[in-house]
Amino acid sequence: MISNMRLLYCIEGMVQGVGFRPFVYALALRHALSGFVLNNEKGVNIEVEGSKESLESFELALFRELPPLARIDFFSKEALTCKNDKHFEIHHSEEGKNKSSLVLPDMSLCDDCLKELHDPHNRRYHYFFINCTNCGPRYSIIKTVPYDRPNTSMAPFVMCDACQSEYTNPLDRRYHAQPISCSTCGPTLFLRSISGKVIATDEQALQHLAALIRSGNIVAMKGMGGFHLVCDASNAAVVERLRERKKRPSKPFAVMFKNLDAIEEVCELTHHEKEGICSLLRPIVLVKQNKKSRLIAPNVAPKLDRLGVFLPYTPLHVILFEYLKKPIVATSANLSGEPIIYEAKTLVNKLSHVVDYYLDYNRDIVNSSDDSVLQYVENKRIVMRSSRGMAPQSFRLKSTDDRNILCVGAHQKNAIAIYLNHQMIISPYIGDLDTIASCELFEAMLERFKEFYDFEPELIVADMHPYYFSTQWAKKQTIPCVFVQHHYAHILSVMCEYALDETVLGIAWDGTGYGDDGTIWGGEFLLCNTDTYERVAYFEPFLLLGGDASIKDTKRILASLLWDVLGTDADAVLCNYFDESSLKRLKQVYTKKINSPLCSSVGRLFDAVAVLCGMHERISYDGESGLLLESLYDERIQEHYTVHFEDKKILYKPMFLQMLEDKEPSLIASKFLNTLVYIFFEVSSKYSQKKVIAGGVFQNRTLLEQLMNKSNETLYFPHQVAINDGGVCAGQLYKVLQKSTH
């Protein structure tokens, strides 16, 4: 007689809302096992009973055949006394005191739903909210965990009998797919004029919206995590009108295409870029434009050779493209510097001067999120904005620390991280904390995470910068605070991703960050481990004339650098950029060092070089200088400028005299980027430790490609977390976790 065994599996990870329980149910039936599976506060518990051979086969399949969105981060297994139950069942969710099951990101339409969407014989043919367990909204509709329909904004929509049958059938693809609905029982679409008048509903609303886009209107369209501003990407006049109305003079717009073939008519794609574009994340991917193509209006991405492209990710977008033949600009609906708008009332209040019509639906967005942005450098993924499809991101960390920890990140490109139950959970992109709306979103995000997980922090970690909103917020709390230097946190974020616990050479180049000496850092070589760091090399500082005023009016940076190397002789050059009175006033600021902190930022050097290359206007978006220099780079130019090294200082300023002699923008841009590569290797070659790089400057694809191609060792940079300030929160957490572990 074969004796049975009973096992309990406690599983944590992405195992709720991804079809994990029906997957387990089907496996148990396949292997003739009895028992049950249920969701609980941490993840999923499975009790299975059967022969030893059947249990071994079950366990093998459990890990090998996971559903597309599932991920097991941790599991435990123990033997139990047999209960001799006859069947395997799916039990209701188990309520607990400590919520820690993971909230998943929203996911784009899966292939199975896409086929049904296009099948005239399917009851969900052309249904705008088609979804299943493998796709559709999650984060955007959830109020709290566990992820059950009553805890989402689908709660008001009562399932019809057909949907209820699918929802309750463990062998159906839509078993417990919380947003399940159909045209009989689901949300309704409304196309409205900006005054609120309903123009059309449902399918007719999409047909009418397409006609409006074709005829040159600017419309707003409610997507997964908020509204997009949409117009015809081939129509330069309407793109210019959008720029004027939105007061966005040159920042590139993202473009949505019907399919990959349409993108390839306009852009040159690598294999990895194609994979990224077509992945379930459906991110915006920065790719190289084909200069011969005339399909996209030049003012979509002025002066640049790159274009942010993405594919339809909701059934709404897919159906819209059935009535459109051209790609569309699809950019976040917001005021400059503010978060994406996700409520129609706010859209009308703030953007009635921009939008002619808007498409809305009556399922609430509970949690907003922007589009994620990626690029591929030498086939390696670089995250520039982690949001829809990617965030909330979760990582299980090896640590014995049991505290609840909150990390509030940086000031620009802010994201926060929480730590509970050995999981680091990083929020979606919040943005620059320069506006009231962004600061309100920061505080709202904290409240969301508290609500999701009943999370109350026992420790807060913040940036050292005394004037960052996030740091000031942290200081106001009654909870203990720890402060981590900005560039050190950049390096720690990469060490966290690779689980490095050793001394490394960290190279952190970005636009700004508060240094130990009270100056602005941003061109740092740090010899560091998880305990401490030493600044072993840095770019010679210059005066940032007028402080933040220089960041927008970058001619000031060039003036500061030229006065440093030429003295009053620089005036003859600078009179090309300033009128006489402006130059005189600025010179007084320089001479008396009025509100002019010392700055060693590589990002600011990009700004100065871009001025010499023809960018005389005020900077209108972060990274504009870097993108311009990238577009001017000529790989045939191998030379670099002359620089010197003195103790820890990198003496680069005389290269600006050489730039004045070179004159030609392409030559200046190419030699400047080559010089940064030269400096990188000159300093790093003196250290045997692993090279870890982070910071917004390394978003520059040309610079990073050169470093990777010329390095004879592995360069460690992030692929999962943002390489810019969006990753700082991860570094802040790694610092306090490793300190507690040591």
Image (cartoon, rainbow, N blue to C red):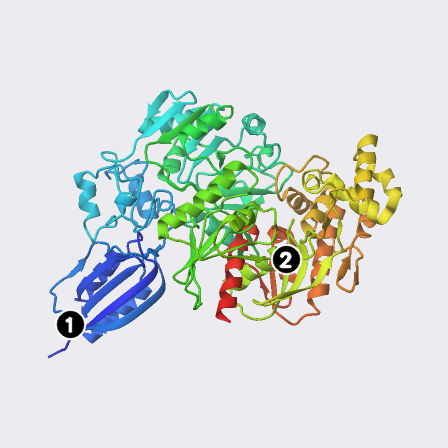
Q: Which residue is mark 1?
A: 82
Looking at the picture, does residue 704 appear above or below residue 80? above
| Image side of residue 356 versus residue 164, left or right | right
Kind of residue indicated by mark 1? Cys
Is 408 on the left or on the right of 535, as rendered? left
Q: Is any atom of residue 238 visible in this view?
A: yes
| Residue 614 position within the rendered picture, expressed as x and y whole percent measured from the top left | 74, 38
Residue, x 60% and y 34% (percent of image)? Answer: 298
Locate the N terminus and report the quarter of the image it occupies.
bottom left
Where residue 544 sits, quadrant-wise, is top right
Pick out the residue farthest to the right: 569
Gap in angstroms between the C-alphas marked 1 and 2: 57 Å
Q: Is residue 719 visible?
A: no
Numbered tag placed on residue 198 in the rendering: none
Disc 2 target residue:
508
Instruction: Determine whether, in the image, residue 178 is placed left or right of residue 32.
Output: right
